[in-house]
Image (tube, rainbow, N blue to C red):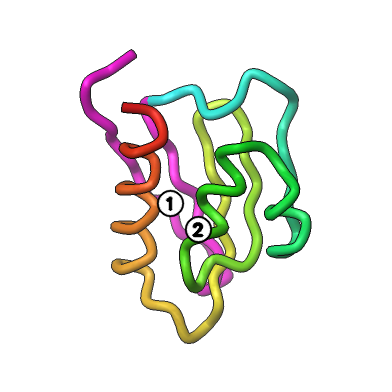
Amino acid sequence: MSEYITINVESNDDPDCIRLITNLMLTDDDSEVYPDRETGDEGSPLAQTLFEIEGLVALEIEDNILIVRRDPDAEWHVLIDEITEALKDFFL
């Protein structure tokens, strides 16, 4: 496992959704889809960890990719920093 985490951010036409590509394999299973906080709270340990972050409302995890939907009131730079810290705490 790497000693550091890199995250590349890809935006799309939806201002409340981004794709985060990491240098880590985030799941060994098929893709995980959590359309809301309730399903995330009962999902994988990684999903449960990420849903502790305020402003994250939906999540998809596949291989090394996170697709994140935010609350429109959440700031992307804050959310990305918190996701990065959560991944560090979880994996390193």
54 sits to left or right of 89: right
Compute the Cα span from label 1 to label 2: 6 Å
Amino acid on which the number 1 mark rests in the picture? Glu
Question: The C terminus appears in which quarter of the rendering?
Answer: top left
- Image coordinates for residue 8, horizontal then vertical, percent: 34, 43
Indicate whether 85 appears above or below 87.
below
Q: Identify the image quadrant of residue 56.
A: bottom right
Q: Secondary structure at mark 1?
A: strand
Which residue type carries mark 2? Ile
* Residue 3: in magenta span: yes
Residue under label 2, please give it: 18
Q: Residue at x 58, y 64 (%)?
A: 69
Given the current orientation, which residue lies at the most extreme top position?
A: 1
For this view, does 12 lie left or right of residue 29?
left
As drawn, the residue found furthest toward the left would be: 3
Q: Residue at x 50, y 29 (%)?
A: 64
User: 49 and 20: which one is in front?
Assistant: 49
Give the magenta range. 1-23
Q: Residue at x 49, y 22 (%)?
A: 25
Q: Name the quarter where the N terminus is drawn.
A: top left
- What residue do we see at 45% from left, 46% from top? 20
1 or 2: tag closer to the N-terminus:
1
Is residue 86 left or right of 2 when viewed as pictured? right
